[in-house]
Image (tube, rainbow, N blue to C red):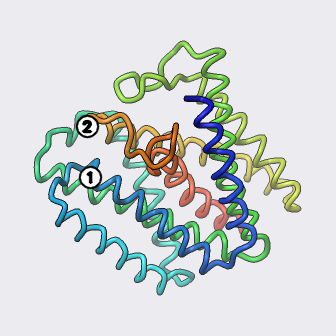
Amino acid sequence: MLLQRTLAALVLAPLVILIILLSSTPVVGLVGALAFLVAAWEWIQLSGLRSPLWRGIVLMATAAIFILLWRVHGTAWTPVLLAAGVAWWLLACLWLRHFAFAAAPTRESRALKLLAGALVIFPAWIALLSIHAHSPHGNWWLLLAFVVVWASDIGAYFSGRAFGKRKLAPQISPGKTWAGVYGALVAGVMVTTLSGWLLDVRGSKLLALGLLAAVTVGASIVGDLLESLMKRHARVKDSGTLIPGHGGLMDRMDSVFAALPVFAAGLLLLGL
């Protein structure tokens, strides 16, 4: 499994990097929207919506909302949508504490999970556009947002394997440990601080950027746990089978969905 995960990452990561660095914001937005639609389809399945017709309707509605959001991105609505994304991930922490909430396969639970999916996906896409369109170095800042998540995943994996004893959320994701959290924070902050230095961030802003990295890593962990909770409720191991060794796209993007609006909002507040 580790070999499959590594090979898939070696193929996908360079592709993501090239798209972010070499493409215009409209192209990044289009590719992002297509990827997010795949993840949305997987979330719709996790929500418990069984009817193929209604799944298709919800997916088409999601695509229509992407078109609407493209028309309003870069306006005064962008900070509002980013703030909504940040607020959602704070609220998601409460859901994780009460992990049995909405577990029953009722109509109300399905509706709530579909609404949660919208709050996961749409602010993240607006954040994607906001960061990439930012001048100067928008493409590099967006790449850093992804690299923070990747680095924290690697840090969590190795520190968890080496020192992990105390479980983080055993009822939701038994494999995650507090040692993994600490490793993720160290890796994420180190990568972000070094990258900020290379992007000419100095002084108090560099310290604030390190703090933003820690908050972003924390959000990415919440995103990972929330998707694990959805899979627990749905009684499935993975959100899909699209990526060998990784599962579905949502399995790979859950942390990114949470990290993007937090990182984008922080950059706006810091004036970077």
User: Residue at 25% across / 50% down in the picture?
Assistant: 47
Q: Which residue was labeled with disc 2? A: 233
Q: Earlier in the sequence, mark 2 or mark 1?
A: 1
Asked whether the residues under the numbered discs 2 and 1 touch, taking CB atoms below 8 Å apart as contact, a structural biologist would say: yes
Farthest residue to the left: give it.
Answer: 106
The residue sitting at 61% across, 63% down in the picture is 264
In this picture, residue 20 sits left or right of residue 103: right
Q: Residue at x 66, y 55 (%)?
A: 145
Of the 4 image quadrants, the one containing the N terminus is top right
68 over 123 or under it: above or below: below
Residue 9 location, quadrant: top right
Closest to the observer, 4 or 107: 4
Secondary structure under badge 2?
A: helix
Q: Residue at x 33, y 53 (%)?
A: 43
Where does residue 246 sit, x and y in percent of width and height?
A: 51, 40
Return the x and y of residue 7 as percentages of the image width and height.
Answer: 65, 40
Q: Nearer the viewer, residue 20 or 141?
A: 20
> Which residue is denoted by mark 1 in the rendering?
113
State the SS at label 1: helix
Residue 208, compared with residue 187, is above or below; it is below
Q: CA distance from mark 2 to mark 1?
A: 11 Å
Q: Residue furthest bottom?
A: 71
Toward the viewer: 232 or 170? Answer: 232
Residue 82 x/y as whole percent: 50, 66
- Name the amino acid, label 2: His
Which quadrant does the C terminus fall into? bottom right
Mark 1 residue type: Lys
Drawn side of residue 231 relative to residue 251, left or right: left
Circle number at residue 136? none
Relative vertical location of residue 233 with respect to residue 240 in this rendering, above or below: above
Is residue 211 rendered to the left or right of residue 164? right
